Image: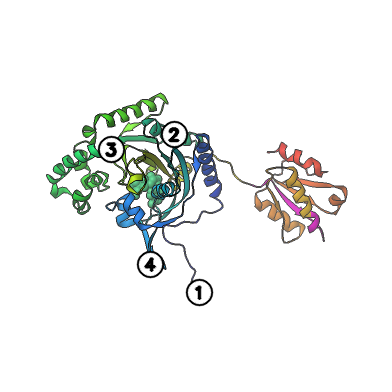
Amino acid sequence: MSNKIQSIRGMNDLLPESSPLWQFVEEVMRRTLKEYGYQEMRMPLVEKTELFKRSIGEVTDIVEKEMYTFEDRNGDSLTLRPEGTAGCVRAVIENGLLRGQPQRLWYMGPMFRHERPQRGRYRQFHQIGVEVFGLEGPDVDAELIAISARIWRELGIGGVTLQINSLGSVHSREQYREQLVTYLNGHHDQLDEDSRRRLQSNPLRILDSKNSDMAELIRQAPLLEDALDDSDRAHFERLKALLEIMGIEYEINPRLVRGLDYYGRTVFEWVTDMLGAQGTICAGGRYDGLVEQIGGKSTPAVGFAIGLERLVELMEEQSIPFEQQQPDAYLVIAGEGMVEAGFSVAEKLRDGIPGLRLITNLDGGSFKAQFRRADRSGARFALVLGEDELSSGTLTVKDLSGEREQQTIPLDDVAEMLSRYN
Ligand code: ATP
Ligand code: MG
């Protein structure tokens, strides 16, 4: 016998027992985004490697060490998407969606990063991403945060905190960068290897370091906030005011820099302390320079992404109720030669009862065996079709929870009877 083939580390199967919760989450997101007038986009899972290098940035964790990059048969360098923003920007440029009107978009699907698998960190994981193009004001940033806050409310999630920060415009960040490099150079001996390398290429990323030995050094670093110019400040103040008007609480986290290069001005994260070290369930910000950077005409943009595995784990942690998907009924087909009749009755029931979750017994089996399957299916009722029922146009209904007496009723009354017990 050959060895069993196993899945790839950090890439998980979603099993039937978990899919109802995932579907509930996805439905709430779809509905909420539709209510705000956002439209769905679907992009390929694979893009040219160059796209991610140019958008996420060469000196980032993702591009330096997390991407699944390979050569295809033509010798082109391709990469499984590690996030969705780059592909979304590529797609809106390529399809001419940025001409004239703003775009409010979302997408959902798997992302791939070669990280060390652990709780809340996988190699294939799922995001819902939301992006707005062509609107530059802080009101857009506020709307995106309001959408995320509403999603938590609709899902029934608690215990999440909003952190916001402003990274300033390109110009103010340039000035801050100089101050920061001067400060860090003064403490060169305390920098780890990664940070020494980044000191020249991307010093702001040092603030995002997860190395606890450098926490104190980072805490005492000059603040980006002090380097913001007047228009950055006004943008940030307006965002805060709008959040307050909507009653959305926030904390200002001056160390929040985000791990990707393309952000400027507003950045935000929703964090929880209920998931251990991987506590960020949603992250986003403004990236006004990116469209131009990858070949489009200069267009303001802002977006966020929710990590679905972490969100689902948080819901499980908080035991949040959601609709289970047990079948309503299981059709037992008793007697020889009854299969055709069984099928036509089942289809008739489905025609007459929209949304009915009905399992038809397949592959025959004795009366007893069929009832065993009915019990295991989790259905509330067994509907029995035997020769007597067929000739009298009835079904015998048995309550599998045992609460009610068995009864034989006309086929046309089944809808009404089932609806009374749902
Ligand atoms: P982290 O700091 O946790 O590595 P990140 O800054 O790399 O996160 P983003 O690129 O901003 O994450 O992705 C947005 C969200 O996607 C994260 O907040 C998180 O919820 C989720 N996410 C990112 N990487 C993973 C992963 N490897 N496994 C599961 N979820 C992830
Ligand atoms: Mg990461």
Is label 1 in a helix, a strand or a loop? loop
Q: Which residue is mark 1?
A: 2
* Relative horizontal placement of residue 315, taking residue 249 as reference (left or right): right
Q: Earlier in the sequence, mark 3 or mark 2?
A: 2
Query: What's the magenta region?
Result: 326-341
Q: Which residue is mark 3?
A: 167
Q: Which residue is mark 2?
A: 149
Specify whether residue 355 is painted magenta: no
- Front one among 120 and 200: 200
Q: What distance separates the C-alpha of mark 4 from that of mark 1?
A: 33 Å
Q: Which mark is residue 75?
A: 4
- Which is more foreground, mark 4 or mark 1? 4
Q: What distance separates the C-alpha of mark 2 from that of mark 1?
A: 51 Å
Q: Earlier in the sequence, mark 4 or mark 3?
A: 4
Q: Is residue 63 above or below residue 149?
A: below
Q: Earlier in the sequence, mark 4 or mark 2?
A: 4
Would you call the spot at circle 1 few (<14 residues within 10 Å), some (14-19), or many (20 or more)? few
For the point 84% across and 51% down, which residue is it? 390
Can residue 271 be seen from the camera position used here? no
- Which is more foreground, mark 2 or mark 1? 2
Q: Amino acid at mark 3?
A: Leu
Q: Are marks 3 and 2 in contact (CB under 8 Å)?
A: no
Is label 4 in a helix, a strand or a loop? loop
- Residue 263 lies, in percent from the top left, at 32, 42
Tag count: 4
Q: Amino acid at mark 2?
A: Ala
Is label 2 in a helix, a strand or a loop? helix
- Which is more foreground, mark 1 or mark 3? 3
Q: Is residue 177 above or below residue 123?
A: above
Q: Amino acid at mark 4?
A: Gly
Would you call the spot at circle 4 few (<14 residues within 10 Å), some (14-19), or many (20 or more)? few
Can residue 350 be seen from the camera position used here? yes
